[in-house]
Amino acid sequence: MATLPADLTDMAGVAIKEATKHGKMIATAESCTGGLISSCLTAAAGSSTAFLCGFVTYANEAKTRLLGVPVDAISEFGAVSDIVAAAMAEGALAHSGADMAVAVTGVAGPGGGTADKPVGLVFLSLAETGEDAVVKRYVFAGTRDDVRRSTVGAALELILSRLREFDDEKNDEKTEA
């Protein structure tokens, strides 16, 4: 088994601790990362307290069948799009029962890029119960492994930043009281 990068597993460990602290369960929906986000999250001891499940939906058919991504969204906007990323996150949330879901779709390379969708283009989305999905667009440089590693780091940071907002919200409530 290949060793996962320590910086990513460390970040995932912090995300698991934060999610546990806030009583949140996480799900993932991954395309170009092929399960690496889930692997990093489950590398943390105690991850079962905050990680519910992961969907690896590499093929468009899997995005549609497992996550409920509309076929029309894929045909109109392409699998690598903000619309599909949001639908993947919302689908993972709906089909898992988790409190939050992160989804990723992108062009990891080395081939497959176009002028409109170059190698390194990635869309990340975070969906939460009762909230609209948030989508972020990135263009990462480097090899296929570099793009995938950068994507995992950005996904973990997206999860962590949202979990840290719960602390900020609690602090704001205490200040107002």
Image (spheres, rainbow, N blue to C red):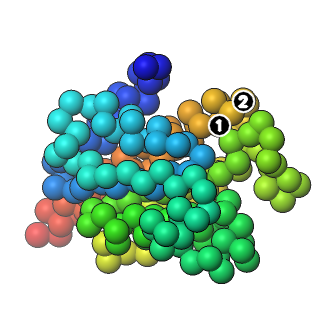
Q: Is residue 9 visible?
A: yes
Q: What residue sits right under mark 1 in the picture? A: 147
Residue 154 percent coordinates (x, y): 52, 43
Q: What residue sits right under mark 2 in the picture? A: 143
Q: Secondary structure at mark 2?
A: loop
Question: What is the quadrant of the N terminus in the image?
Answer: top left
Q: Residue shown at 38%/59% (left/top)?
A: 101
Q: Residues within 10 Å of mark 2 (few under 14, many from 20)?
A: some
Residue 18 percent coordinates (x, y): 24, 45
Q: Residue shown at 46%/42% (left/top)?
A: 35
| Residue 43 sits above or below residue 173 on the image | above
Residue type highlighted by circle 2:
Thr
Q: Is there CB contact under 8 Å for labels 1 and 2? A: yes
Residue 107 percent coordinates (x, y): 70, 48
Q: Residue shown at 48%/51% (left/top)?
A: 56
Q: Secondary structure at mark 1?
A: helix
Quarter assignment of residue 44 = top left
Residue 153 percent coordinates (x, y): 50, 38
The disc label shown at residue 134, or none: none
Q: For this rendering, which residue is in front, 128 or 143?
A: 143
